[in-house]
Image (tube, coloured by chain):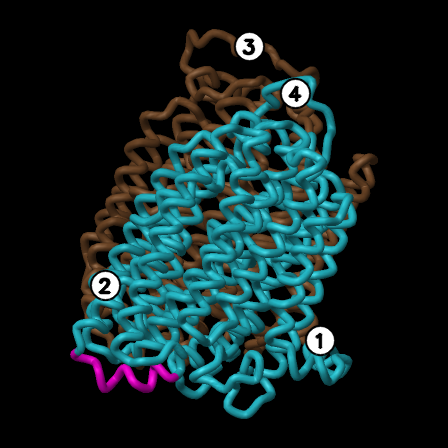
Amino acid sequence: MIDLILNLAPAWALEHAAPLLIMVPLVLAPILAVVPSGRIAWIMSIAATVGSLLLAIVLLGLVQTTPGNVLSYAVGGWRPPLGIELRVDSLNAMILLMISAIAVLASIFSWPTVNAEIPVRKRPLFYSAFLICFAGLAGVAITGDAFNLFVFLEISSISTYVLVALGAGRDRRALPAAFNYLIMGTIGATFYVIGVGFLFAATGTLNMAEMATMLPELSGNRSIHAGFAFIIVGLGLKAAMWPLHQWLPNAYAYSPSFVTMFLSATATKVALYALIRFLFTVFRPDFAFEQASFMFLLAPLAMAAMVICSFQACFQTDVRRVLAYSSVAQVGYMLLGVSIGTTIGLSAGLLHMFNHAMIKGALFMAVAGVVLTYQGTHVRDFAGLGRSAPWTMTGFAIAALSLIGVPLTAGFQSKLQLGYALFDHGWWWAVAVVVFSSILAVIYMGRILEAIFFQPPLNPRKHRKEAPILLLVPLWVLALANIYFGIAAGFPIGLARDAAAAAFGVEAFR
Amino acid sequence: MTPELLITLIMIVPLIIAGGIGVAGKVPNIREAVTLIGAAILFGLVVMLVMQVAGGARPELVLGEAAPGLLFAFKVEPLGALFAVVASGLWIVNSFYSIGYMRGNRERNQTRFYICFAVAIFGAMGVAMAGNLFTLFVFYEILTLSTYPLVTHKGDAAAQRGGRIYLLTLLATSIGLFLAAIMWTWALAGNSLAFVDGGLLAGANISPAVASALLVLFAFGVGKAGLMPVHFWLPNAMVAPTPVSAFLHAVAVVKAGVFTILKISMYIFGADLLASTPAREFILWTACFTIIVASLVAMTKDNLKARLAYSTVAQLAYVTAGAMLANQAGFLGGGLQIAAHAAGKMTLFMCAGAIYVATGMTNISDMRGLGRKMPIVFIAFFVAALSIIGIPPLAGGWPKYELMQGAINGGEPFVLAVLIGSSLLNIIYLLPIPILALMPPPGTPEPKPFKRAGGAPFLTVAAPVFTASLCVVIFFFAGDIANFLAPAVSGGTATSIIGAQP
């Protein structure tokens, strides 16, 4: 499949794939803003994301076939380190593939929910904001320049605030949620840019690869240490690292269904990618202070997230808040994998990132279907839906089982890999935490599943009402992907291992 | 047929049956025909495979790689073949019984019931033939999930509560402890989870503390083995219709649990490593504790199915105890117990079901004198109870004998006392039921008339009679079964165990 697309791609696409990936949505976004009809905007956003997905596949193919596995593109012909460099290796090729695939599915599924939740005249603007957000996320993933990363981070964040606030049509609480997110997100971005400033002061460059070569000589430098701390906190805030996740549950619960689905599957993942990029590529993991930060900072925070947020998820009554808290807990799994500080650990974290995007994407799509047909997200509202909307709810159930980590689902593979990495590193006590958190997942997802399949409907007049087909198809694509990658996990594990090897700068291992 | 093809067919046939039942769901007679014919075909295939295994073949089939180091692989060895033949053979009997019971009781959602049953068999076959721990775990969970709708079949509040406890306990232990143990094994053994003769971890240099932790995780993680304190899902699962209790909770599910324990003891730890693991003693004591305490609890239960459930918990611990003796006789006793207890306990449950269909009675205290009206059922019950107690010439005698032998060889004489005590307790809580039913003391009021006109349906009586007679048959073929198991339990070097038997 990758080979086929590589062969079909024209020469200009092969040469300029990296900038085109961002430029397609970024250029289309302002055009969408002036398009008269929401439907045309929808079709154009599908076209833009499909284009980006194809380019992401091209990039992945190029990275895999290029010797050295790194693609570098000088924007505007200005050579790095002076100019901005777009740099694609196995790590961000995987991230780009993931977010653009989710973006395609998200934009296909968006129309029914946007139709129901967004006022007519705001629809083109809504799609415009979505494309800007997507372009920003892709930009964060693709850039090789630390300051440029900040710019893209802000592009995606500002459009996200707008998208979240548009949920006000359905629930006024979206406005304080968006404001809260705005404040927290801005603090995070500010911290990040302060950290970059420290690094720039010490190294005199903003290019990440260049920075990475200069940092080892400066390892005792205080401003490097300060910059490191600022960057970790800033990106940690964006990635919803516990306890910096307070913005997330409300933002997920009250934004439009489509936004929740898209953000949950991409936004925190991209921030986490940036964190990994800095931890492993810019700063080398052999920095003594960084080793300490893995062991004493990231791992405890990750485990706290896994336990505390799973507990919180057990006590939520709104399904979207259950899933939101679960997301924070799942970010904990990824961080735990990262914090092991080995290639296997990092690949386990990345694999879970990939799988979690599929899981949460499917779950929030199903919830969006229920919002659409039954106008409720309380657990009670889900009672008896297994009979009235079997297709939607079976998709939900598959993803829920995957989240729990039942065998033959993708979530099981990520738990196995994580457990293997932890035992391999001798952190058997951390496995106990993983396991405990999984059991909490059984409880909080089991509660919803039981309501869906085994409780009588709250409102007996509820008749058979499936989600629209446009919503069901992407939902089932994700649900089946969960099963497929649970049975044959070779492809994502291969991607994750290549990515981990790229982050560490070592030979790829399989 | 090549063994590889046989394995493939054995895995596919239950799924085809499940599909066929779904298609024929509207026409009950065709639906039942699909079940019966499919079950017979499955049993035939398993028997053919068993013949090849008995001839010394160890067929293997690798379906593919789920992830690096994690293979979907099947490998049939004698113990697994025995479990497969027991499960698939008794499934035929149980299918006849189910038809009688479900129709006699006019249960709803029968199509779903039979589909889930077929999927459960699929899970049991997968567990029996799994070639590594990963595959075993996958099918173990399929078995858990497919039996949940069966447990909650009635759909009322009690069934939901029981089903919730069932699912949560089994999932929590398997994901919480069993999976952790698997991952640990995977890391210790260096990217392999295969079942190896003599033990996968035998060569790996692991400390006694690690081995102990691993063993404890396995023993309590395999919740289906019902070791106390993770046994309580089993009594709660008794809300299920009786065919489910009879087959799944006396044969397929619980035996899958103890089979897993045996398999781990033999092929992951290996007798030598297991014998030198300190926690082995602890698990052995826990098993003995379970044997005694579950029997004592059984005495207090007036509900017949609850009493049988606690009796099952006690009997399952025999197998765990046998595995923890870590010698040939212990393993052999555990293997024989899988077959012998299956026939006996299934009979008891089917009798309980027949009584329920005919009279609606569930309490033992109401059954005095009932044997006059249902003599065949209670005679079958009596025979099976004797088998569970372990009186020759009934099947239950052999495993007890081998376990005692193993306890003496292994230098654990207290196990002997526990086994004898267990037999005495069995007599106290099982035998009074048929005796009081068949020979009520003078002055016992006449039991209530049958709820269902005509009493128990024919099939619900014929099936327990058949399995009760199996208890006798197995006694006389125990030597053959032991011969069959010998290469597995003696770790490849087939020494003659049979010579040591009277």
- Element type at marker 1? loop
Tell me the mark number nearer the camera, choosing from 3 and 1.
1
| 3D distance between C-alphas at marks 1 and 2 | 48 Å
Q: Which residue is drawn at 53% across and 25% down?
A: A380
| 3D distance between C-alphas at marks 3 and 1 | 72 Å
Which amino acid type is marked by label 3? Lys
Which subunit holds the residue at mark 4? B
Which amino acid type is marked by label 1? Met
Instruction: Look at the image and tell me whether residue B241 can be seen.
Output: no
- Element type at marker 3? loop
Tell me the mark number nearer the camera, choosing from 1 and 2.
1
Q: In the rendered image, which residue does mark 3 sit on? A: B448
Q: Let me know if marks 2 and 3 both belong to one chain.
A: yes
Q: In the rendered image, which residue does mark 4 sit on? A: B455
Which subunit holds the residue at mark 3? B
Which subunit holds the residue at mark 1? A
Give the colour in which the image draws chain B. brown
Where residue B206 appears, as percent x and y from the top left, is: 24, 75
Where residue B281 appears, as percent x and y from the top left, is: 20, 58
Judging depth in this view, the residue of B497 and A406 nearest the camera is: A406
Q: In the rendered image, which residue does mark 1 sit on? A: A1
Q: In the rendered image, which residue does mark 2 sit on? A: B212
Asked if residue B366 is positioned above or below residue A141 in the image, the reply reads above
Judging depth in this view, the residue of B248 and B321 nearest the camera is: B248
Which amino acid type is marked by label 4? Gly
